[in-house]
């Protein structure tokens, strides 16, 4: 395992020209200071490589930084421990912390859910993954939509053009 120390977040402009106010940095540090946070390759949660821990808040006139220590896995054994950690982390974050909301969603979806559904790891919502659920929820609507789809190919890129008849409304 390799360990690195660095700066996780600053109050300066990021590559997208966004600036995090000091208040947001303070709240973020306060909320996450004792929590191991997964690190994913290119922010792709299907490619975990380690985890990080916010270690401090450094401030000087006109500048603030949240510092961190990151650990990157190197061996199969370390990666297996990371997988176990991620499973527990995901369960806590997406299931345990949202039991009421998940129960309500399952209740609303009723008999539409298959026995193979799972909780989707979405940070700003409570969501369920279930193969072909859209077909079970909206069978008539899906049939009408797919009858209107036209695919065109241009220079190895697929474009999807959708033309809806007057009968179909999206809300």
Image (cartoon, helix red, strand yellow):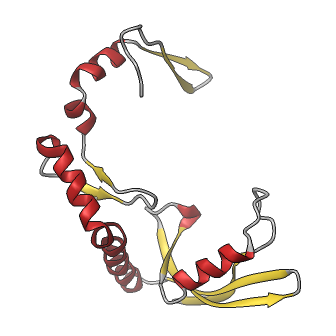
Image check: 33 left or right of 167?
Answer: right
Measuring from the top left, give residue 108's x and y in whole percent.
Answer: 20, 46
Classify the position of the C terminus by image quarter: top left
Q: Residue furthest top?
A: 166
Whether residue 75 is situated above or below residue 87 in the rendered picture: below
Whether residue 53 is situated above or below residue 92 in the rendered picture: below
Whether residue 75 is situated above or below residue 155 in the rendered picture: below
Question: Which image quarter: residue 88?
Answer: bottom left
Measuring from the top left, give residue 4's x and y in whole percent.
Answer: 63, 88
Q: Residue at x 46, y 63 (%)?
A: 45
Measuring from the top left, give residue 148's x and y in whole percent.
Answer: 39, 12
Of 85 and 35, nearer the camera is 35
Q: Residue at x 50, y 90 (%)?
A: 34
Number of numbered discs on residues = 0
Question: Which image quarter: residue 118?
Answer: bottom left
Q: Residue at x 58, y 62 (%)?
A: 42
Whether residue 128 is situated above or below residue 37 in the rendered picture: above
Measuring from the top left, give residue 41's x and y in whole percent.
Answer: 55, 66
Q: Residue at x 35, y 18 (%)?
A: 145
Image check: 26 left or right of 116?
Answer: right
Q: Residue furthest right?
A: 61
């Amino acid at each position: 395992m390799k360990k690195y120390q660095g700066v996780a977040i600053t109050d300066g402009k990021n590559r997208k020209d966004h600036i995090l106010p000091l208040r947001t940095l303070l709240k973020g540090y306060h909320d996450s200071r004792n929590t191991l946070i997964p690190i994913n390759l290119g922010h792709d949660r299907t490619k975990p490589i380690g985890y990080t821990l916010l270690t401090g808040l450094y401030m000087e006139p006109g500048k603030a930084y949240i510092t961190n220590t990151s650990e990157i896995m190197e061996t199969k054994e370390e990666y297996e421990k990371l997988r176990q950690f991620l499973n527990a982390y995901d369960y806590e974050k997406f299931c345990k912390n949202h039991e009421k909301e998940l129960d309500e969603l399952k209740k609303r979806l009723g008999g539409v859910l298959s026995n193979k559904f799972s909780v989707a790891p979405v940070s700003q919502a409570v969501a369920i993954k279930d193969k072909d659920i859209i077909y079970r929820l909206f069978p008539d609507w899906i049939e009408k939509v797919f009858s209107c789809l036209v695919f065109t190919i241009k220079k190895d890129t697929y474009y999807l053009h959708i033309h809806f008849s007057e009968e179909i409304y999206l809300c």
